Amino acid sequence: MNFIRYKLLGPIGLIIFVFAMIVSSCNRGRVAHHEEKKKDSLSFKPVYGIPFTEVRRRLKNGMSFDNNGFQTEPSYKITFLANDSASVYSPEKKQFINFFVFMEGDSIFNVARSYFKMMQMSKDSLKLQVLEVQGDTLHMKHSLVYMTFYSNDYLKNVLKTNAATLGKPDRNDTLFIKKKAELANRIPDSAFSARIPVTMESRSPRVTVKYLKIKPDVSNNFDDSDGYMNPEFNITINKAYEDFSYSFWAFVDDKGQMYFDRSVDYIMPEYRESTTKTIKAIIDGYLKYYLIVKPGNTLGIVHTSAVLLNVVGRK
């Protein structure tokens, strides 16, 4: 096809076409050189060997909490050793581990299985944007979490404080949670995850309760937020009226009262009403009677939240 197109251009047209191809090739060379230069433009040299501790993690709106109750908590410690390596603190091993740093374009880099964009860098502080990754794609518009670091020297000798103090939620966070809690306590469908989740304790040897705690490790990138975002309990009832097994979400209001929300398992339409009725009867007849339930709270503010219950009955 290309050969046929060249012949149709004619001698003069062919000369023009070849010239255009040469210019285009040169331009591509300049672009490639520019892109390569852009890719290497980020350098950690100004901060080599300086230990940094994360002191603040905020959403784009400046809050520590999102609408679902997720809290952004500062926990990162990092020292850039070179442009291709950094030492990152591992909460699991309780020690610093060296990781390779992989550079991307536009001040983006990968370290310790996470992508970041460098927003600001100085010997006293760093500001990073946490990038959301899905497959091979970086979603910049969905990456709304920002991390602020101070050097350990700046924290200790200039600010004379510590990361734990600076990382606490502020007054705006409290007002935000208070408003959401008031709505959730009036309208259960507005419930959000409690930072200190619901607790359940059995008051009878017939019933056992186990909270499925999430352990932060390398598999979840040392993030245990799923433990309070989706609190899950295994409940076994012995000497039940019959054998049964149900998994469902339930609301726990600010008084500790439990209400059925929805089933986890698919229920055929013709059985939906009867199954829902059965689960509600289990809540009222067993769970409310045999369990001591303490509602969840966020920043000390008690509010309605949801829990996932896997309830097994043994006759």
Image (cartoon, rainbow, N blue to C red):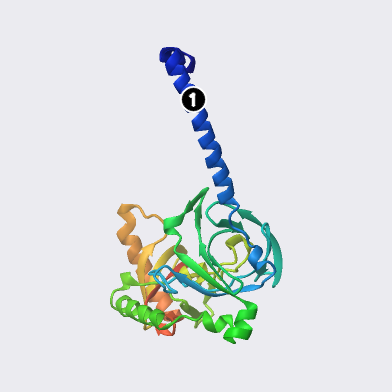
Element type at mark 1: helix
Give coordinates of residue 87: x percent, y percent: 69, 66
Reply above or below: 274 against 148.
Answer: above
Closer to us: 95 or 147: 147
Give me the residue at 42% from left, 60% from top: 264
Q: Is residue 103 visible?
A: yes
Residue at 51%, 54% (x, y): give it: 133
Residue 255 x, y percent position in the rendering: 37, 83
Residue extending farthest to the left is: 186
Q: Is residue 140 left or right of residue 268?
A: right
Residue in the foreground of this view, choosing between 144 and 70: 144
**Which residue, given by chain and number where applicable, does mark 1 sit on?**
19
Toward the bottom, the furthest residue is 160
Foreground pick, 187 / 28: 28
Query: Three-letter amino acid code at disc 1?
Result: Phe
Horizontal and vertical percent position of residue 73: 52, 74
Q: Residue at x 60, y 52 (%)?
A: 40
Q: How many marks?
A: 1
